[in-house]
Amino acid sequence: MTPKEIIRNWVDVFNTADAEAMGEFYHEDAVNHQVANDPVSGREAIVQRFREEFEQADMVCLVEQILEDGEWAILEWKDPQGLRGCGFFHIVNGKIAFQRGYWDKLSFLRLHKLPIPTQ
């Protein structure tokens, strides 16, 4: 599968909120860095982060576009509430080795009525 196809499948699974299934997309030593948060290293830690996120908010990823350049896929997304972001995925041997995402955390917290940190 191409990086673009892998990320299209990643979005489909993300929208089921199945953290364990999300883990199948990642290398054992993958890194997921959502720039609004600290980086997460290793598949198990990434799965745990997805568990926590899926428990705190109902998230839906709507694809605006997916671009591909060699081993990289770039996802531009929105959600039904108007939040937008993008993600960069380095795909090696059919799995995500590195992911970086950009989105507005304050808007996310407000949209989902989650506590806003004071620091």
Image (cartoon, rainbow, N blue to C red):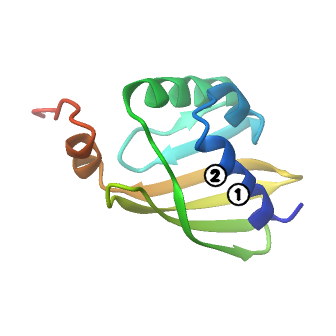
Query: What residue is shown with label 2?
Result: 11
Q: Relative to 112, is 74 above or below?
A: below
Q: Nearer the viewer, mark 2 or mark 1?
A: 2
- Left or right? Give the position of 78 relative to 1: left
Instruction: Kindly identify the residue that appears in the image at 75 percent across and 66 percent down.
Output: 4
Q: Relative to 13, is 54 above or below?
A: above
Q: Relative to 72, is 18 above or below?
A: above
Quadrant of the rendered image containing residue 22: top right
Q: Relative to 106, is 43 above or below?
A: above
Instruction: Kindly identify the residue that appears in the image at 25 percent across and 41 percent down.
Output: 109
Residue 61 on image: x %, y %: 51, 53
- Left or right? Give the position of 84 relative to 26: left
Residue neighbourhood size for the residue with mark 2, other residues' Cα within 10 Å, grouped as few (<14), some (14–19), many (≥20): some
The type of residue carrying mark 1 is Ile
Quadrant of the rendered image containing residue 47: top right
- Which type of secondary structure does the marked residue at label 2 adopt? helix
Query: What residue is shown with label 1?
Result: 7
Quarter occupied by the C terminus? top left
Furthest toward the front, the residue is 80
Residue neighbourhood size for the residue with mark 1, other residues' Cα within 10 Å, grouped as few (<14), some (14–19), many (≥20): many
Residue 34 on image: x %, y %: 46, 47
Quarter occupied by the N terminus? bottom right
Instruction: Give the distance between the C-alpha atoms of the residues marked 2 and 1, in whole angstroms.
Output: 6 Å
Instruction: Kindly identify the residue that appears in the image at 29 percent across and 47 percent down.
Output: 108
Closer to the camera, 44 or 62?
A: 62
Instruction: Kindly identify the residue that appears in the image at 82 percent across and 54 percent down.
Output: 92
Residue 87 on image: x %, y %: 54, 60
- Left or right? Give the position of 75 relative to 106: right
- Which type of secondary structure does the marked residue at label 1 adopt? helix
The type of residue carrying mark 2 is Val
Contact (Cβ within 8 Å) of mark 2 with mark 1: yes
